[in-house]
Amino acid sequence: MRTRNIVLIIVLLVIAVVGARFWFNAKAPLNPAPAMPAVAKTNTPTALEFLASEVVTTEPTELRQMMQLTGTLRAVDQVTMKAKVAAEVRAVMVREGEAVAAGQIVVKLDTGEYDARVSQARGNLNNARAQLEIATKTRDNNLALVEKGFISKNALDNSASQYAAAKASVDAAQGALDIVLKSLNDTVSRSPISGLVSVRHVQPGEKVSIDSRLIEIVNLQKLELEAAVPSSEIARVAIGQKVELSVEGLSQHFDGKVVRINPSTQAGSRSVPVYVQVTNPQNLLRVGMFAEGRLLLSSKSGVMALPQSAVRKVNDSSFVFAIVNNKIERVPVTIGSTGLVGDDHHIEITSGLEFGAQVIRADMGNLTPGTPVRVNGTPKR
């Protein structure tokens, strides 16, 4: 009996659930309201953002044609002082790096031997002068005697010959004295130029022979760069052209100009040496420094020029990506010569753009014309 009641209750519950579901479906509308339509998506392109450094504004500028030069610096006035006589070094008055003036004594040699030679030469000169004095008196006396007829003409001629020989002896003795005096003076070495001592070859007490090196002196006020120019380019180089120099190890630039062009080519390379005079303010430059120069061949003022990276080339045509009305636009341009604006390589634009146009500086691939653009900051000029 209890089991039958449980079964009956379960059956009634099932009937109730089915009935409730049927009732709910009957209440639901036959045509349910359609869902809210989705908002249509637009295809508006996103604006590209460029930094100010990535955009350049065209303006009149100076485009320069330059030629690269390289070489080492050397002194125009440089001297190696050598011994003019053989002697012992008594004193060296200067050391490396010291400044010397033209005419300043730098080395003294021993003078003992040359003092003795001077004394000997003076003695010979005095003896010759005494002989000349005797010969002069004899000649004058014989001349008076000939006029009175006391002696023959031959006697007068003999006295005249003796006078001439005595006079020649005096001249020879004077020459010998001058030679030994010069040798004595050569024991003192004086700097022929003003400059700085670069090398000191001798020390006191050393014995030096003729042509032995004593001191090397350089003048840093006048330096020059010797650079080799290919023979195919030498026709573009002229005396007086300006050169901008950068020297290894120094941050600043130096000015120079072409002062000489070698009339012959170098063996092997077939290049022509060109000499550039360099200004040396504050003696910053030193002999032997490596330098790179840019020779100004020609310049154009008031031209339009863009960095090489801003100009794209397809086949035989060129174009740039410009910003027009805040959108990318592909603009065909006609290009001219290449050169430098400041330190950067540029290309001349002869047509296609107006001054004041904004151009994408860097190569950013194939940009789509019509794309909106936003520039952060003020573009460079």
Image: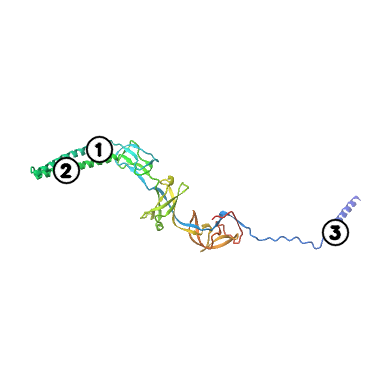
Tell me residue 21's x, y (percent). Answer: 84, 57
The answer to whether the residue labelled 2 contacts the one labelled 1, judged by CB atoms less than 8 Å apart, is: no
Q: Is residue 268 above or below residue 184?
A: below
Tell me residue 345's x, y (percent). Answer: 49, 56
Q: Secondary structure under badge 1?
A: helix
Q: CA distance from mark 1 to mark 3?
A: 152 Å
Question: Which quarter of the image is occupied by the C terminus?
Answer: bottom right
Q: Where is mark 1, residue-wise?
A: 118
Q: Is residue 284 visible?
A: no
Taking 375 as reference, is 237 left or right?
left
Sequence-wise, the earlier of marks 2 and 1 is 1
Tell me residue 196's x, y (percent). Answer: 39, 42
The kind of residue on which mark 1 rests is Val
Q: Where is mark 2, residue-wise?
A: 165
- Along the viewing direction, whichever of 260 and 267 lies nearer the viewer: 260
Taking 336 as reference, is 121 left or right?
left
Q: CA distance from mark 2 to mark 3?
A: 168 Å
Q: Residue at x 27, y 40 (%)?
A: 183
Q: Secondary structure under badge 2?
A: helix
Figure quadrant of residue 284: top left
The kind of residue on which mark 2 rests is Ala
Q: Looking at the image, is mark 1 or mark 3 nearer the viewer?
A: 1
Sequence-wise, the earlier of marks 1 and 3 is 3
Q: Is residue 182 above or below residue 325?
A: above
The answer to whether the residue labelled 2 contacts the one labelled 3, judged by CB atoms less than 8 Å apart, is: no
Tell me residue 361's x, y (percent). Answer: 55, 57
Q: Where is mark 3, residue-wise?
A: 23
